[in-house]
């Protein structure tokens, strides 16, 4: 199994760095491969370094403009360079069996929401999961619950978004995951 990991290019607080390092090392120890954005900066670099140090399989996918900016992780055994951010996300989705969001900012949210939405639209049947470090995702979950309460989001879609705090919970969630039916399906004649 391989998971796409979305996380920040900034380092965040020390508690996040240590939790992310432990999570990535735990994935490696469990034999779960990681595909991520290929960067060396921030929590992205922490994920790669910790997984590699624990003997993990790590694949980076990075657009050429970030390679040109010298942001590519120099120690990856496999780094795929693509032309654009769109290609990066599509390639990561193709390589992954599940999507995991660790703490991050706008890019992390955008990647998670695109993967989660693709699942709603029937473009894949892979789980999407938030790893809730220090309650980081709780305000987002409150907003998503508001979307359900106001009728914008089907509660089954929110129920299908995993919320875990560690590798064991992630693996259990993925093991029992049942993908909800497509949001939009053709109407029978």
Image (cartoon, rainbow, N blue to C red):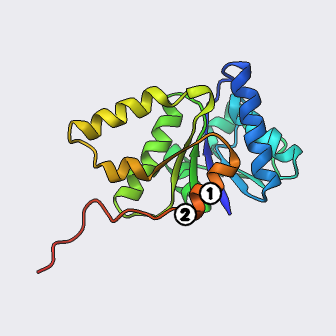
* Image quarter in which the N terminus is found: bottom right
Residue 119 coordinates in the image, percent (x, y): 41, 58
Question: 60 above or below 120?
Answer: above
Which residue bears the numbered disc 2?
Answer: 176
User: Residue lying furthest top in this view?
Assistant: 13
Q: Residues within 10 Å of mark 1 (few under 14, many from 20)?
A: few
Mark carried by residue 172: 1
Residue 86 visible in image: yes
Q: Is residue 175 left or right of residue 116?
A: right
- Quarter in which the C terminus is drawn: bottom left
Name the residue rendered at 62%, 51% in the picture. 170
Q: In this rendering, is residue 99 above or below 121?
A: above
User: Residue 48's mark?
Assistant: none
Instruction: Confirm or deny contact between disc 1 and disc 2 (CB under 8 A).
Output: yes
Q: Report the residue at 88% width, 44% height from top.
A: 53
Tell me where residue 126 appears, x and y as whole percent. Answer: 50, 61
Spot the residue most to the bottom. Answer: 189
Q: Alpha carbon of mark 1 to alpha carbon of mark 2: how far? A: 6 Å
- Residue 112 vs residue 144, the one in the foreground: 144
Horizontal relation, residue 97 to residue 150: left or right: right
> Which quarter of the figure has residue 102?
top right
Viewer-proximal residue among 64 and 125: 125
> Total marks drawn?
2
Q: Residue at x 54, y 57 (%)?
A: 93
Few, some or many residues within 10 Å of mark 2 (<14, 14–19, 20+): few
- Is disc 2 placed on a helix, strand or loop? helix
Task: Examine the image and state in which quarter residue 181 appears.
Answer: bottom left
The image position of residue 66, as x and y in percent, is 64, 36
Please indicate, yes or no, whether residue 40 appears anywhere in the rendered image. no
Q: Secondary structure at mark 1?
A: helix
Q: Is residue 178 left or right of residue 145?
A: right
Residue 135 lies, in percent from the top left, at 56, 27
């Amino acid at each position: 199994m391989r998971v796409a990991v979305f996380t920040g290019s900034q380092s965040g607080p020390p508690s996040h760095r240590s939790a992310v390092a432990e999570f990535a090392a735990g994935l490696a120890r469990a034999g779960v491969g990681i595909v991520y954005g290929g960067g060396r900066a921030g929590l992205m670099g922490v994920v790669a370094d910790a997984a590699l140090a624990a003997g993990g399989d790590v694949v980076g996918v990075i657009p050429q403009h970030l390679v040109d900016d010298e942001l590519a992780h120099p120690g990856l055994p496999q780094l795929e360079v693509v032309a654009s951010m769109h290609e990066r996300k599509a390639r990561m989705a193709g390589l992954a069996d599940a999507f995991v969001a660790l703490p991050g900012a706008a890019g992390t949210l955008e990647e998670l929401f695109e993967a989660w939405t693709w699942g709603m639209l029937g473009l894949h049947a892979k789980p999407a999961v938030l790893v809730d470090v220090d309650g980081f995702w709780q305000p987002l979950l409150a907003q998503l619950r508001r979307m359900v309460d106001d009728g914008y989001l089907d509660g089954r879609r929110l129920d299908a978004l995993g919320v875990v705090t560690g590798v064991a919970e992630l693996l259990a969630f993925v093991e029992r995951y049942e993908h909800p039916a497509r949001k939009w399906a053709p109407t029978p004649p």
